[in-house]
Image: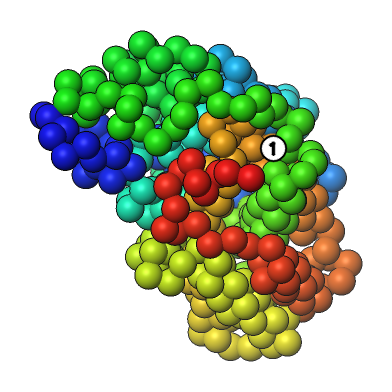
């Protein structure tokens, strides 16, 4: 392969490496969705088996989100300082070990501890996997492929719901142990696939390691390409992690954290307690269980729609529409909590479909708005900050359902969506036509 036309790597066509890297990197959101959602499937049986109090039940559901708060920022710092690929494999080892350890828990606090550690590993995987992928992708496909990674969160969640239901039906009173430990299977599969992934050429270049960066580019694109074809100037100005807390990058991290938080608080609450929420609205038994599965599948279609619209509609417009229409679905759920089962499922399905636009931008905006030197830290910090709200929201759901009722809980979720809409209108930039260096320039 030669580069006779001096094509920038930002405009180079997708090759097999890009496609494989996208699949390998999808392990982060897939396992995130699987591990966080499987707990909702088994929570009722688990609660009875370990005799959980309402407090312990909330902590079990929220522990992984708390762990992601620590893992996201620490993982981001680590990948910016020592490279993308170091943790790329290690986090999957951690995920496999901690998932398997859940099989033998005998107390609430043992399970809470393991769920916390799983969250740390998941949080660390987000910044390194998405940063590595973003730094290799060409401009035209960057948004849609990064967006499709978020869709894998819902694929993982859907698989968790289906696998969890099948395990609960076939493994008896200890089925919850098998369901929680089942995450070891995809963790090991992704671990095998990721072995041998090269370091990011952009990261190497930002550290002044030009020869290594050039070797990576030639390995990926062919001998006709070199670092001169990469629009990432070597030895850039000194941008440190402290830039995330002031000036223009401080405003960007605030925007990313706000929109990410407002998009996932209702989502995580619904995922962790979907059967319980549906039961509170009059859907019980098999209808509640399979209704939760149907809603999860619609989430996947919502994300697929977001992936298709991200370039023609643009980042900013898609995010505003997503918050508006998904928020209205939550408002109607709050206004009509005793509606017919079909209406309830349709409104939950509408929320799941429309929120897809906001969900798919969770990996796009953070990776596009920050330079290579602090990209991992920015994605990690945004992950961490968003999980504070998500953990609080998830923890408060069972308390909210029992204290203020399902109607007010849904109206509160609507309010959160409107906060996301306001800050999107106020602060969201448009980056669809920019290469990575220009999009991330302050």
Residue located at (68% from left, 50% from top): 252
Instruction: Please say if 126 is above or below 184.
Output: below
**Disc 1 on helix, strand or loop?**
helix
Total label count? 1
The x, y position of residue 359, in whole percent, is 54, 58
Q: Nearer the viewer, residue 391 or 168?
A: 391
Q: Is residue 52 left or right of residue 272?
A: right
Point out the image quarter for the C terminus. top right
Q: Which residue is mark 1?
A: 381
Q: Is residue 2 left or right of residue 290?
A: left
Q: Is residue 231 left or right of residue 319?
A: left
Q: Nearer the viewer, residue 227 or 329?
A: 227
Q: Nearer the viewer, residue 180 or 4?
A: 4
The x, y position of residue 175, in whole percent, is 51, 38
Q: Specify how the rendered protein is coloured.
A: rainbow
User: Dot 1, how many residues are within 10 Å of its Cα: few (below 14), some (14-19), or many (20+)?
Assistant: many
Residue located at (53% from left, 21% from top): 235
Instruction: Please say if 243 is above or below 334.
Output: above
């Amino acid at each position: 392969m030669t580069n006779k036309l001096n094509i920038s790597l930002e405009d180079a066509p997708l090759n097999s490496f890009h496609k494989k890297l996208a699949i390998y990197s999808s392990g982060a959101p897939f396992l995130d969705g699987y591990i966080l959602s499987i707990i909702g499937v088994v929570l009722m049986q688990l609660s009875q088996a370990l005799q959980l109090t309402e407090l312990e039940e909330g902590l079990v559901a929220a522990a992984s989100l708390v762990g992601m708060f620590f893992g996201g920022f620490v993982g981001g710092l680590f990948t910016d300082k020592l490279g993308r690929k170091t943790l790329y494999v290690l986090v999957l080892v951690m995920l496999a070990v901690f998932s398997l350890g859940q099989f033998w828990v005998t107390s609430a606090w043992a399970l809470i501890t393991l769920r916390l550690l799983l969250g740390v590993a998941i949080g660390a995987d987000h910044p390194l996997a998405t940063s590595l992928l973003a730094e290799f992708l060409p401009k035209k496909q960057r948004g849609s492929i990064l967006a499709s990674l978020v869709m894998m969160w819902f694929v993982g969640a859907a698989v968790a719901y289906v696998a969890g239901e099948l395990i609960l039906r076939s493994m008896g009173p200890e089925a919850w142990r098998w369901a929680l430990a089942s995450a070891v299977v995809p963790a090991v599969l992704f671990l095998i696939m990721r072995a041998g992934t090269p370091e990011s050429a952009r990261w190497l270049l930002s550290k002044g390691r030009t020869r290594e960066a050039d070797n990576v580019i030639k390995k990926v694109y062919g001998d006709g390409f070199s670092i001169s074809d990469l629009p990432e100037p070597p030895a850039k100005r000194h941008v440190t992690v402290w830039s995330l807390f002031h000036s223009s990058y401080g405003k960007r991290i605030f925007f990313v954290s706000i929109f990410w938080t407002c998009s996932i608080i209702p989502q995580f609450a619904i995922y962790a307690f979907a059967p319980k929420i549906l039961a509170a609205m009059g859907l019980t038994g098999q209808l509640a269980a399979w209704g939760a599965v149907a809603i999860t599948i619609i989430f996947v279609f919502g994300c697929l729609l977001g992936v298709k619209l991200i370039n023609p509609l643009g980042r900013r417009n898609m995010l505003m529409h997503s918050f508006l229409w998904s928020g209205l679905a939550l408002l109607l759920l709050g206004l009509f909590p005793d509606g017919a089962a079909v209406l309830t499922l349709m409104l939950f399905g509408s929320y799941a479909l429309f929120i897809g636009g906001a969900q798919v931008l969770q990996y796009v905006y953070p990776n596009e708005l920050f330079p290579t030197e602090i990209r991992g830290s920015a994605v990690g910090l945004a992950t961490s900050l968003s999980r504070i709200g998500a953990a609080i929201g998830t923890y408060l759901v069972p308390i909210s359902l029992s204290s203020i009722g399902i109607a007010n809980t849904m109206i509160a979720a609507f309010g959160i969506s409107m906060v996301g809409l306001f800050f999107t209108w106020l602060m969201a930039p448009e980056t669809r036509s920019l290469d990575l260096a220009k999009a991330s320039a302050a």
